[in-house]
Amino acid sequence: MSETAEEHEAHEELEPEVEVEELDPEVVAQRDAALSHVRKFGDPILKTKARPVKEFDEALRAEIERMSGLMNDALGIGLAANQVGVLNRVLVYRVHGQAPTAALVNPEIEWRSSEEEIAEEGCLSLPHVHVEVERPVHVRVSARDGFGDPIVVEASGLEARVIQHEIDHLDGVLILNRTSREQRKEAMRALRERQATLATG
């Protein structure tokens, strides 16, 4: 199946929206610095379920601001708190470049459409890995903002996919758990090869 433009964007979750070679060196350095704060595959926190937030205070809002900055510097479109080592049920996302960053605290999917779609997804915690994932096209999500006020998001397409991807993170679920056995094996091989390359310098 050929990718639509939206599907192409979808697997850029925390991958660059443009090729690194095309980026200004300062932007590349900024991206690399942001990525150094993101937990990578193999870190047990990525398989740990995050805890509901109970205190809606300045510390929480500072956490949201930090996550938003890291996501944007990494040229990503979504980030969950446990990806940066914090076991709080917090996610941030921005699916369109000019849109403001959205934060969802204690998000819960209230409704999923029966219509589903397969698209490739990537993840900062799984560098250079892209796998096909089937997800509902539309979702309704209830959450709180950084001040504890209730919010409801009705999302479709790329926005719905990103939110579901990040909620998976908060539940300790990776895209490798959502794809076929064949793609998972291929992804694991690529991850091992990359880890071996980094280890040998």
Image: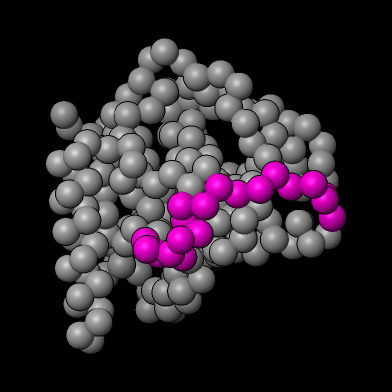
- Position above or below: 73 against 99: below
Left or right relative to 117: residue 32:
right
Asked if residue 98 can be seen in this view, the reply is no
Left or right relative to 153: residue 185:
left
Left or right relative to 58: residue 192:
left
Where in the figure is residue 83, as x and y percent of width and height?
A: 51, 59
Q: Does residue 50 belong to the magenta stretch?
A: yes
- Position above or below: 168 against 64: above
Report the quarter where the C terminus lies: bottom left
Prevailing SS of the magenta stretch: loop
User: Observer-nearest residue: 40 or 49?
Assistant: 49
Left or right relative to 137: residue 146:
right
Colouring chosen for the image of the structure: one colour
Asked if residue 187 can be seen in this view, the reply is yes
User: Observer-nearest residue: 47 or 119?
Assistant: 47
Q: Residue at x 62, y 56 (%)?
A: 87
Q: Identify the image quadrant of residue 121.
A: top left
Figure disc tally:
0
Q: Residue at x 31, y 45 (%)?
A: 176
Q: Does residue 119 belong to the magenta stretch?
A: no
Magenta residue span: 39-57
Q: Residue at x 27, y 38 (%)?
A: 179
Where in the figure is residue 15, as x and y percent of width and height?
A: 36, 56
Residue at the farthest bottom position? 201
Q: Identify the image quadrant of residue 173.
A: top left
Where in the figure is residue 154, as x and y percent of width and height?
A: 59, 24
Where in the figure is residue 77, as x and y percent of width and height?
A: 48, 49
- Position above or below: 2 against 187: above
Q: Residue at x 43, y 64 (%)?
A: 43
- Position above or below: 45 against 35: above
User: Observer-nearest residue: 57 or 51?
Assistant: 51
Report the quarter where the N terminus lies: top left
